Image (cartoon, rainbow, N blue to C red):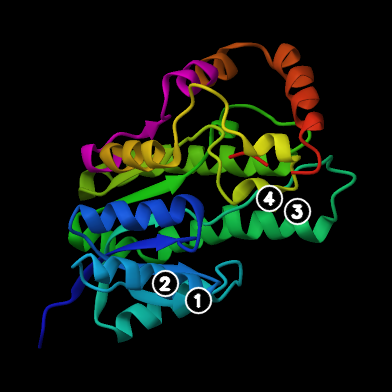
Amino acid sequence: MSAPRTIALITGASEGLGVEFARLFAERGHDLALVARRADRLEALADEIAASGRPRPLVIALDLARPDAPGELGAALAGAGARIEYLVNNAGYGLNGSFSSLPIDDQLGMIDLNVRSLTAMARQFLPDLKATRGGMLNVASIAGFAPGPGMAVYYASKAYVLSLSEALSEELRADGVRVTALCPGPVVTGFQARAGMSPKAFAAPPGVASARETVLAGYDALIAGRRVVTPGLVNRALAAGLAWIPHSITLPQLAARQAKRLGGAEK
């Protein structure tokens, strides 16, 4: 019997940070499995990686918001003779707008993907991560450091990802499994359009990390076994401020900032 194909699994790999993660992991010599809803984009990315001389990634088109998706994904990978060494939980989205104005089904769908699916994926592939003494990289956000009026459910979902990641990093340390929460600031990706922010939100603020810098920071932190990484000096300063400044001061400012973005997005 041949040895299992040891891979890095990248979710949300059809655009934005997911594409950058796939390219970086391939460059660093990892075999890959790419997961997202849009098969055509995944196939194009797999072709690009194969053309660079790397093994062609496994491509699995799947809506991870479905309750049965993690199990279906696990069966597909087992059928391909693959096991997970690194899990990158990148799939997720945000919605800009007040809690009372956004449709509840849309907000619950965001919880399904950002929270429930990420949790189920972590549990589904934990045996593989223990067996390979690998690692899990969960894409949280700088939004996880504070409540976010105007994007209340999104901010809360990322606070969950950050808290879960830090707890798992301690629980799994004795098993040799590294868990890292990546907390990017406003990286310009497809996230902006999906969140419903104004076109002005599509311009990267000066001094923040680019998409490439963001995934590099996340990868390096994962390999080094760091619990939390916030790429970019500006983002680290903002995260520190959000953690220590009283919410009574930051909440009105965050609410005003989100109101200006109505009609376009940010991570």
- Amino acid marked by disc 1: Asp
Residue type at mark 2 is Ala
- Name the spot of residue 89 as percent of width and height, x first: 44, 55
Res. 44 mark = 2
Foreground mark, 3 or 1, reads 1
Residue extent of the magenta highlight: 222-238
Q: Secondary structure at mark 3?
A: helix
Vertical arrangement, residue 132 with respect to residue 21, above or below:
below
User: Separation of disc 3 and disc 1 at Cα?
Assistant: 27 Å
Rendered residue at 62%/44% (across/down): 157
Q: Which mark is residue 61?
A: none
Identify the secondary structure beneath mark 4: helix
- The numbered disc on residue 193 is 4
Q: Could you give the CA–CA distance between mark 2 and mark 1, rounded to whole angstroms?
A: 6 Å
Disc with the residue nearer the chain's start (1 vs 4) = 1
Q: Quadrant of residue 65?
A: bottom right
Badge 3 crowding class, 10 Å Cα cut-off, few under 14, some 14 to 19, many 20 or more, is: some
